[in-house]
Image (spheres, rainbow, N blue to C red):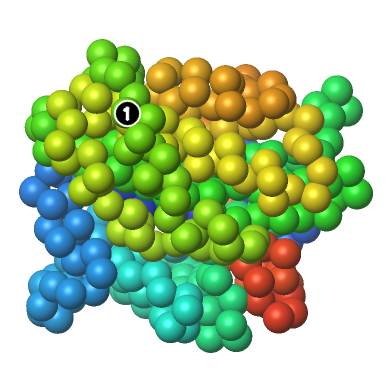
Amino acid sequence: MTGVWAIGLMSGTSGDGVDAALIRADATHIHEFGPALGRPYEPAFRARLKACYGGKAPAEEIAAIERELTRLHAEAVHQLLAQAGMKPAEIHVVGFHGQTILHAPKERRTWQIGDGAELARATGIDVVNDFRSADVAAGGQGAPLVPIFHLALADMLPKEVKRPLAVLNIGGVANVTWIGRDGSLLAFDTGPGNALIDDWAQRHKGEPVDLGGALAKAGRIDEDVLAQLLSHPFFDQKAPKSLDRNAFHSTMVDHLSAADGAATLTAFTAASIARAIYLFPEPAQNWLICGGGRHNPVLMEALEERLDAPVRSVDDINWNGDALEAQAFAYLALRSLAGLPLSFPTTTAVPQPMTGGKLHRA
């Protein structure tokens, strides 16, 4: 068996917790998947973390949150190692995404909090973090960064999974990777993912998510409001393109009932994803869905109605849909160490293929 063991850590824009995953890989191929886990954040910490979004919280509060976030990631690494029966010396590197609190690529700014040097000290393992800054500084969108990992995964699929293939991640923001027959890539954020739905459920039901899509299922879509939401200028932009979690707001649905608002926001996510079809060089023959949104049956049904191709969860093809992004950052850390590109003109609009990441020795 070739390759080395690497750990990936991901805390997405939904801000619900940290995912950790082990893979054995080299800088170009995935050889084996190890265990993975998810550690949810306590509600109080999640609320404080979300208050940092936009980078507008007091500097001392952001620093305090960063210290706590790093500690929680270190605990996730130790828990994963215990689960795998492995020691830090057996791990080549940790890919530490950190937590995005600001993403404004037009201003050439992106901010992921998380102390890579402290994580290396706390785990005894070399850490690569700050994956997005180099891309943004060079004029790229800084997101999405997972397409090269999606391609490595797709190369492991049986031939009956036909290309072109679309891999859709529905996190706080939704993003898609289009993989052509020849392995060519196109990637971009499609629009809102779970963020608006989650915030609506929290406000109206005191729950962090619309569990099982129950609230949306009980409501009716307001087509006029949906049309207004879809008139956002983002949808007229060419790909590649990316979004901040807070680029969209639910103010247009504030006058609706809790159920109708949830139904309309869920339809908005599905409809904005369907808009991606018009940006593909060629229609996708299959859609594979990962991220938390795949657990929402109302959203999945809406995608099946709007996408003119088979739609299925990545779990159906034996990918770990809950660990995929964490696995991706383990792989990206290995590519960073090898000096290989993480992003490309067709994935982030960076002018030329761009490596990235900063290494912190244990």
Residue type, numbered disc 1: Asp
Q: Position of residue 115 (x, y in %)?
A: 32, 73
Q: Position of residue 210 (x, y in %)?
A: 26, 27
Q: Residue at x 21, y 48 (%)?
A: 251
The relative height of residue 304 versus residue 141 in the rendered view (above or below) is above
Q: Residue furthest front?
A: 224
Q: Position of residue 148 (x, y in %)?
A: 70, 56
- Which residue is under mark 1? 222
The relative height of residue 341 versus residue 270 in the rendered view (above or below) is below
Q: Position of residue 213 (x, y in %)?
A: 32, 21
Q: Residues within 10 Å of mark 1 (few under 14, many from 20)?
A: some
Position of 350 with respect to 171 (left or right) is: right
Image quarter in which the C terminus is found: bottom left
Kindly tell me whether residue 201 is visible in this rendering: no
Q: Residue at x 27, y 52 (%)?
A: 249
Q: Residue at x 59, y 76 (%)?
A: 140
